[in-house]
Amino acid sequence: MRRRSPLSLDRIIERMAAFSAPRHRDLVRAMVSELQSIADPAERKRFAVGAIAAIVRLALSRYSGTIVHPGRFLGIPEPEDNANLGGPSMPKLSTQQLLSRHVTPFAVAFALLTALQLANFAARQLPQLSARGVSAGTLLEALLLAMPFTMALTIPMAVFLAVSWVFTRLGVEGVLAAAQRERHGVRRLIGPVLGAAAVIAALTFVSNTQILPRTNARLAAVLADTPVERTDRSMTLGELREAARNALTDAGPDAAALAVAYEVEIQKKFALAAACLVLALAGATIALRFPRGGIGLVIGASGVVFTGYYISLVAGEALADQQLVAPFVAMWMANAILLAIILLLSWRSGGPGGRSMEILAIGG
């Protein structure tokens, strides 16, 4: 048997296959197999040169973001725009099917998180109410009135849990890998999810600005067993804006602090609603970065994200109350930090111009 030269064309292609990107490796190995089956020297040389050029272009496309079809070098018709290279096609998931997979995880996560928050509230407040001899109806009313302010946090958290769980399952099923190989595959997955998250964000905003202030006012009266003066947390959005304007024109010693407190509450209502979108994007990004993480990834990432987000929110509010930072910066700091982490994870996952960066260019 004739020994191949270390510089033979098929040996060169084999060496290049070992250093190819994982998503192109199967395609390059197929080129090697095809090359070895060609007997005619001239045809073999033509195919080898075309294969080497295709491999180089594939390597360059990883950094330039250019979609390269190696078939043009090998005399093979180019695939359609939505075709993928070196792997199975992305399973066809309709928007309805994709979103329906999020319904149960979202409902379960929302119910559990809200129940935990209400249990914490009950442990702190109900003993005091019971000591005053209030009726069972009043205790139940207090729990129901506490739901809107717990939902302000549990809804965004449930969105994150649902998206990260579903996308992790899609990773295990191979859907994410196929989507990353296809042109606009990631966008087709994340687009409907962000659309649904936007709807949830809008509903959360309405709840935070209209329902929450009224229930907070009633809850404060129930807990105090007497009418109480309205505060920034028991004012609607319009009332907060009017109060902030009045505080700015007031010459009193506490006018500046009051204006800041009102503005903080205004920005918080917007930021918590927007968190539904940011956390949905975070859940999808983490799943794309670690597609086979499983339930351990979902639980671990949830703990880190929720803790970090809450600390950033509380710290921002404290800094704003001390007038060290602007209310807008203070309340949007948590979302900004999370978006920066999303950008970093997307860049690390796909590289500059990589497929995973599509998650940050939904509208393109």
Image (cartoon, rainbow, N blue to C red):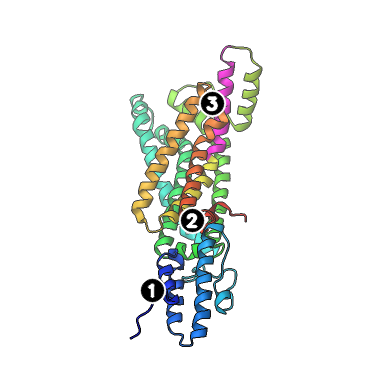
Q: CA distance from mark 1 to mark 2?
A: 33 Å
Residue at 64% x, 19% y is 248
Q: Where is residue 134 shown, x and y percent of the image?
A: 38, 28
For the residues labelled 2 and 3, say whether their Cβ atoms are less than 8 Å apart.
no
Please rate how many residues cluster around mark 3, counting C-alpha atoms within 10 Å: few if below 14, some from 14 to 19, many from 20. Answer: some
Query: Which disc number belongs to residue 350?
Result: 2
Residue at the disc numbered 1? 6
Q: CA distance from mark 2 to mark 3?
A: 35 Å
**Is-magenta flag for residue 256?**
yes
Q: CA distance from mark 3 to mark 1?
A: 65 Å
Q: From the image, state whether disc 1 or disc 2 is nearer to you.
A: 1
Which residues fall within the magenta stretch? 253-272
Residue at the disc numbered 3? 325
Q: Where is residue 36 shown, x and y percent of the image?
A: 42, 82
**Mark 3 element type:** loop
Residue at 56% x, 27% y is 326
State which tag comes first along the sequence, 3 or 1.
Answer: 1
